Amino acid sequence: MMNEMFRFRKPDGGQAFYQKERRTTAFIAIFILILIFDTIVLRTIDPERLIEPDETSKDWSIEVSVFEQTETVSEELSANQMIQTSIDLALSQQEYLQSVSITIQCSDEDEPGEAFSDEINARSDLSAVDGLPADKDESGSCLEGTEDDLVLTWTFLDASSVELNQTDKTQSEVLQLFESGKIGTGTWNAEIELQVVTAGGITAIDNGEQVTVTWTISTFEIDLNSN
Amino acid sequence: MGYMQNLWLRGVRAAIFLCALVFIPVVRAEEGIKETADTLDLMILSMGLNLLIALTLLWFVLKYKENFIQNRLFLAVISLLFLANGIHFASESLVLLKGSSFSDRSVNFLLMMRASMDFYTATIFMLIFVLFPSPVFTQRKHMIWLGVIVATLYILLLIVFISQIVPSTTVVLISNIFMLVGFMIPIRWYLLYRDSPTQLERNHAVAAGMLGIAILVSQGMFSWTSIFVYGGETLVASMGGVTNADVLDTVAWSVVFNHARFVMSSMFLLYIVFKELTVAKDIVSSPLRFVALAVFFVGILNALVNGLVEDPNLSSLWNFFAIRGTYGLVRPLLIVYLLLKFNLIDMGNPEVRKVARLVALVLISVWVAMVFEIFQAFLPIPQLLSAAIIGVVLAFLIGWEDRMFENVAKDSEDSQLHIIEEFVEPDDVSRFITMGLVTMIIGCFLAFVKTGLLV
């Protein structure tokens, strides 16, 4: 009796293999389908999502690696013309934002004298940036021979301000120290306008300048080692 | 005589009740400000429970040789499973209790021994499914060969894993393929015969479902919500460990292979839940339906705790219950139920009955302690009060256990299974026990070699 029950085909009933085993076949087929789906998901998912944080208190040493990324736009501007520039900022799981800067250079090389020094005006629009950092609106003179005429900086977290040896803290508590470096993602917009200053309106000899805008994004990554 | 026995039982109950009310509060209050929610407590409880059941079953097998050989062989293999689990918990408890005073090598040895015992239990699953409820092989030569093959496979894979002759991923793949084939035995049996018109076939299907849950509950059944990974990623990790995931950019293949086991056992659970809720009224198995639904809802609770609870104390206690508690606490309960329900131990013998009742009492006590340990983690109540509650609950359960025990152990139509008279030779039981113990010792010895303690 026991042996008969195990047979794939019941000898008395004479059922075909697929009739008796249809549930088993369906079970295995669904299993294979789910397994294929899960394999694809698991192999493409960020492994960090699968690691549970270690919540035991330990002593930690922190290694910080700072990275800088720049993006430059350069245009010849006439009076009251402007450059509209933007960058998209995204951070990976391990990345933290240290600061974002806009450096504007304009060399007023054709000015005949001090009264002819052109000015630039930079305005930011950070409404699409996570954490809503404050907008800035600043002006500067395009003095001949100076390297940076205007620098706008937003600092989120100075990596050097965090003590690199932390004692009796959980991993989450250490990561919490860097929390303010996790904002600032999104689209950063800025407008840079050139104002030509010409004494007495003599535009023929002072009609525009080469303006260079450089975005500098400073990020850092941390490596936690428990002692 | 009967009156005296009854009086004696009442006396024992009263004594336990008084002890619970007087001694437990004092002992627990002595702990003072010590945190009561501690996974170590549960680990030690699990160790004791597993070793107790293993030794009791071995005693049954060796002493009561008149029991059916088929039952004795299954009990022998189950006792080896519990023994391996007991050693697993003993190693881990020792590391937690005394690890700081041990050398690194000794701690590594204990941890490696825990791993080799884990692998031992995983390998023995196939043997269990082949033996019960419906032996796949009904002749001696097949059964003993299967035992030899399983033992050889365990030792070979362990040696390959330790010596790293091939990448560990290959070992994980091979062992998972063997395990999946083994899992299909009770699954196929349940799928085929759960709604069979023959009572005996249905009994086998119910027993297969119950044994399937008892064994596979440790293979991801409490994490069934992670069957499609999304929404349950952390559960995948907690059940299988993310080998090298923090080093590599992608999840290691070993995690994917291990996940296959969780998918199969979760599908089995969901099918049992579906089937037990839709099967015709007259063939419903209330215990199986209850157990399947309990595991199903614990799975939902597990997802909620993992997703919502931020208290690390409660999380670690819950994770212990949901991961290691599956084979430390849940499996013993279900296996003891199976043994009683399907008369695998000769309950007609008064001596056996007494010992079986003792095991049931220990099971109840451990479960009450565990529930309170978890309960206290999220609802801090004074030590004295909680201890008094434990005492009262225990006293009630011990009274209630008597009736439950009688109900489960009674001979009824739905507890009959096929018994094969000439299953194996009587000596095969001791051969299996010897082979199992020797294999276990070799596993521990290989852990010894791996950690360099021989050099």
Image (cartoon, helix red, strand yellow):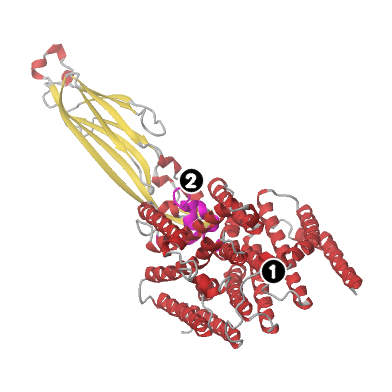
Can residue B107 be seen in the rendering of this structure? no
Q: Is residue B187 above or below residue B54?
A: above
The residue beneath circle 2 is A176
Is residue B341 or residue B26 the one in the foreground? B341
Which quadrant would residue A96 be assigned to in this image? top left
Residue type at numbered disc 2: Gln
Residue type at numbered disc 1: Leu
Is B3 magenta? The answer is no
Residue A99 locus on image (x, y percent) = 35, 39
Residue B57 locus on image (x, y percent) = 66, 76
Disc number lying in front (2 or 1) = 1
Chain bearing mark 1: B
| Point 66% across, 73% down: residue | B344
Chain bearing mark 2: A
Q: Is residue B188 above or below residue A164?
A: below
The residue beneath circle 1 is B340
| Point 36% across, 42% down: residue | A98
| Point 40% across, 30% down: residue | A132
Is residue B380 or residue B402 the one in the foreground? B402
| Point 75% across, 65% down: residue | B405
Magenta span of residues: B217-244
Q: Are marks 2 and 1 on the same chain?
A: no
Q: Is residue A120 above or below residue B173?
A: above
Separation of marks 2 and 1 at Cα, in angstroms? 53 Å
The N terminus of chain B is located in which quarter? bottom right
Residue B361 locus on image (x, y percent) = 75, 66
Secondary structure beneath label 2: helix
Residue B328 locus on image (x, y percent) = 61, 66
